[in-house]
Each structure stands twice: as structure tokens, then as C-alpha cells.
């Protein structure tokens, strides 16, 4: 079918496909950030319930290294703050991509309804005639 479309319409379809791929990538990144955020918030809540003298360890690559309560709490708070910002940023990016996709889709529909600037095989009224 795309072989019968005017070049402008084919270009819009390619742009739509690119935007769809971008949207999928952003959604995957956002999902990962949200998952990590939930895990970090859960760890922070667990830390709240511990005595400050409790022996703790943190991961450094393949190793577990001894750490103190304040250091662990501060690191988790920073991670949560950072992930909240990342999630918000990805949400905004996801919305922008969705808006761009809808605008482009509308442009393509108008282009096809007008025959893409050419009569095309279906005539100037598009599929089904008048």
C-alpha cells in the first residue's frame, strides 16, 4: 500500500514509526525508573524501622562494604530524590512524544483525505469517492 502513497505521506508514516519507537523507549525507561524508585522507597522505609546501631552493608560492585546508618540513609534519600526527578522528566517526555504523535497522525490523515496533494489511484475524494 505504501508504494501508492505520495512521498510526503510516506515521510509522515516514517516519522510516525520513529515516534512510536521513541515512545516505546521512553515508556521502558520510565517503567524501569519507577520500579527502582519503588524499591528505593521500600528500602528507605525499612531503614526507618532499624536501630541506628545496626550493622549495615552496601553493595560496591561485587562486594558488600560496611556502612553506617546515616551514610546509608543519606545515600538512599539522594537516590529517591534523583529517581523522582528522572520519573517526572520521563513522564513529561512521554507526554510530548504522545502529543507529537497525535499531531503527526492528524497531519497524515488530512493529507490522505486530500489525496496527498495528488489525485492518486483513489481520486481527489479519497477512498470511496464522493
Image (tube, rainbow, N blue to C red):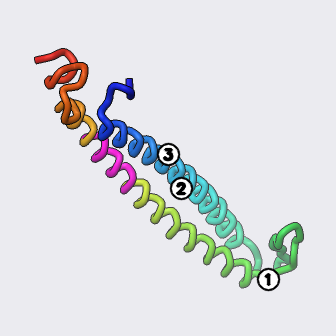
Cβ–Cβ below 8 Å for labels 1 and 3? no
* Whole-percent x, y for residue 73 in the image: 69, 78
Reading the image, the residue beneath label 3 is 21
Which residue is at 19% across, 35% downward? 117
Badge 1 element = loop
Disc 2 + disc 3, Cβ < 8 Å: no
The mark that comes first in sequence, 1 or 3, is: 3
Describe the element under mark 3 as helix, strand or loop.
helix
Quarter the C terminus occupies: top left
Q: How many marks?
A: 3
The residue shown at (22%, 19%) is: 122
Check residue 76 for magenta coloring: no
* Disc marking residue 30: 2
Q: What residue is shown with label 1? A: 68
Place residue 118 in its image quadrant: top left
Residue 10: x and y in percent read 36, 37
Q: Is residue 126 above or below residue 15?
A: above
Mark 1 and mark 2 lie on one chain; the one further toward the N terminus is: 2
Name the quadrant containing residue 83. bottom right
Q: Secondary structure at mark 2?
A: helix
Q: CA distance from mark 1 to mark 2?
A: 31 Å
For disc 1, the neighbor class at 10 Å (few under 14, some 14 to 19, many from 20) is some
Residues marked 1 and 2 touching at CB (< 8 Å)? no
User: What residue span does the magenta drawing correspond to?
Assistant: 96-106
Where is 34 relative to 66, above or below?
above
Work out whether 105 lies above or below 47: above
Amino acid at each position: 500500500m505504501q508504494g501508492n502513497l505520495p512521498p510526503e505521506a510516506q515521510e509522515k508514516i516514517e516519522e510516525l514509526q520513529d515516534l512510536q519507537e521513541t515512545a516505546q523507549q521512553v515508556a521502558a525507561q520510565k517503567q524501569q525508573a519507577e520500579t527502582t524508585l519503588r524499591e528505593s522507597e521500600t528500602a528507605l522505609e525499612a531503614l526507618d524501622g532499624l536501630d541506628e546501631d545496626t550493622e549495615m552493608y552496601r553493595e560496591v560492585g561485587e562486594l558488600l562494604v560496611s556502612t553506617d546508618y546515616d551514610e546509608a540513609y543519606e545515600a538512599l534519600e539522594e537516590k529517591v530524590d534523583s529517581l523522582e526527578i528522572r520519573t517526572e522528566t520521563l513522564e513529561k517526555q512521554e507526554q510530548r512524544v504522545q502529543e507529537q504523535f497525535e499531531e503527526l497522525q492528524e497531519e497524515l490523515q488530512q493529507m490522505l483525505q486530500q489525496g496527498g496533494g495528488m489525485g492518486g489511484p483513489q481520486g481527489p475524494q479519497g477512498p470511496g469517492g464522493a
